[in-house]
Image (spheres, rainbow, N blue to C red):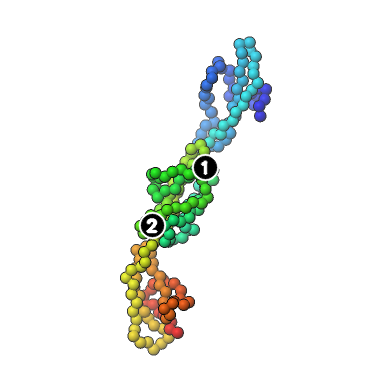
Amino acid sequence: TNGSDCSGVSGQSVEPYVSNTSKTYSGAGANKEETLRSCVMVSDKAGNWSSASFDTISYDTQAPVVGGAPLVLAGNADVTTATVVQAAINASGASEMQLSLDSGFAGAAWVAYSGAATVNLPCVDGTATVYVRFRDGAGNTTLGSSDTVIVDRSAPVGLSLSGPSAVSGSTVSLSLTGTDANGPVQVRLSESPSFTAATWTDLLSPHSFPLS
């Protein structure tokens, strides 16, 4: 609040008038956020002083605070077939963020902070790593954080199914094969070509299949 003098403002001194000057903040340090208040009064040669004028500025050396899970891709799924996924983002005190497939954030633009974003994944199958970092209005920037998701748009290969030509019991032992470069293979087995009521299960060989 403006007042008639600079009482209550520390570090006061009387100096010759200049149109521009600078002052060193004695409380400067890392990881600090506070509002600084400055005051100025001017006088003429007769010693007549003006009323005080005040201004405030935010002193901020504290980077945004990154949440426990700053970036979560595709709803925390392990695998996706999508080319574009949703990302959940968590940081406080951030005004901007960068998202990138490059750990050095090469070519990544700063955009307004948001708790959600869409991310374009690589066109090739494999583990995709996405990086995020944040900065506040004073330019304090966090280190990068990341999350990964397996991109798998290719069907398993080398699939085969074999078993005995005749059985006498209520189950049959089947030999199954199949591989996928990006993780374990699952199968559905059914006596019906429409796979009615059949559920996905991990590929195991031999596989015991109940007959109806």
| Residue at image point 44% right, 46% down | 144
Expressed as whole percent of the image width and height from the top left, the position of residue 111 reads 48, 44
The answer to which of marks 2 and 1 sits earlier in the sequence is 1
Q: Is residue 98 left or right of residue 59?
A: left
| Residue at image point 35% right, 87% down | 166
Q: Which residue carries the number 1 mark?
A: 95
User: Can I make out residue 142 in this image?
Assistant: no
| Residue at image point 49% right, 58% down | 75
Label 2 secondary element: strand
In this orientation, which residue lies closer to the viewer: 169 or 179? 179
Q: Is residue 168 left or right of residue 39?
A: left
Comparing labels 2 and 1, the label whose residue is closer to the camera:
1
Q: Are marks 2 and 1 in contact (CB under 8 Å)?
A: no
Label 1 secondary element: loop
Quadrant placement of the C terminus? bottom left
Q: Amino acid at mark 1?
A: Ser
Q: Amino acid at mark 2?
A: Thr
Q: Is residue 28 left or right of residue 200?
A: right
User: Can I make out residue 2 in this image?
Assistant: yes
Alpha-carbon span between mark 2 and mark 1: 30 Å
| Residue farthest along the top direction in this orientation | 46
How many C-alpha atoms fall within 10 Å of the one at disc 1: few (<14), some, or many (≥20)? some
Vertical relation: 43 (above or below) 89: above
Vertical relation: 59 (above or below) 190: above
Vertical relation: 58 (above or below) 43: below
Expressed as whole percent of the image width and height from the top left, the position of residue 22 reads 52, 24
Q: Which residue carries the number 2 mark?
A: 127
Q: Looking at the rendering, which quadrant does residue 47 occupy? A: top right
Expressed as whole percent of the image width and height from the top left, the position of residue 141 reads 47, 41
| Residue at image point 42% right, 53% down | 120
| Residue farthest along the right direction in this orientation | 4
